[in-house]
Image (spheres, rainbow, N blue to C red):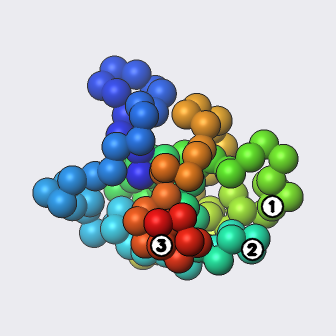
Amino acid sequence: MRIFDSGENKPSRFAPPSPTDEPDPVKRAIIDAIKLVYDPEIPVNLYDLGLIYDIRVSPPTRSCVVNMTLTSANCPEAQTLPGEVQHAAESVDGIDTAHVNIVWDPPWDKDMMSDEAKLHTGLM
């Protein structure tokens, strides 16, 4: 997950959440649902790959916005992965609609992967 600079709508360089930054239960459930979506070319879920930059939940409208990226602009799954993320988010109790934005800033790189994902892919 990416941390947004205050007052800006651009993600800052990757900064994993601290252990004290526990998300609310709906956001946690969205993260858990997204962790069930795997990149078909890399056997790691999209969240641990570092492709999910931000999740914003609006309880009054029962909606959320997910900002995500892809490993490359030429990703062969570019047409399907955002829909899978949307479906995962909308499967969560408390969310009726989800909107997924594809963003390219900052560009994805392997340093954005979780330690578990790096270990699983042999990068650690």
- Mark positioned earlier in the residue sequence (1 or 3): 1
Which mark is drawn over residue 77? 1
Instruction: Judge by depth and name the residue closer to the eye, 95 or 56.
Output: 56
- Mark positioned earlier in the residue sequence (2 or 3): 2
Residue 36 image point, x, y percent: 55, 78
Who's the residue at 80% across and 61% down the image? 77
Residue 5 image point, x, y percent: 34, 27
Who's the residue at 30% across and 25% down the image? 6
Which mark is drawn over residue 119? 3
Instruction: Judge by depth and name the residue closer to the eye, 12 or 59.
Output: 12
- Relative placement, left or right, of 103 versus 48 is right
Tell me whether the residue at label 2 lies in contact with that at label 1, contact meaning CB atoms closer than 8 angstroms. Answer: yes
- Mark positioned earlier in the residue sequence (2 or 1): 2
Neighbour tally class for label 2: few under 14, some 14-19, many 20 plus, Cα within 10 Å: few
Instruction: Judge by depth and name the residue closer to the eye, 33 or 96.
Output: 33
Q: Which residue is mark 2?
A: 40
Q: Place residue 90 in its image quadrant.
A: bottom right
Q: Please say whether residue 20 is visible from this viewpoint.
A: yes
User: Alpha carbon of mark 2 to alpha carbon of mark 3: how far?
Assistant: 18 Å
Of marks 2 and 3, the one in the foreground: 3
- Three-letter code, disc 2: Pro
Who's the residue at 68% across and 51% down the image? 71
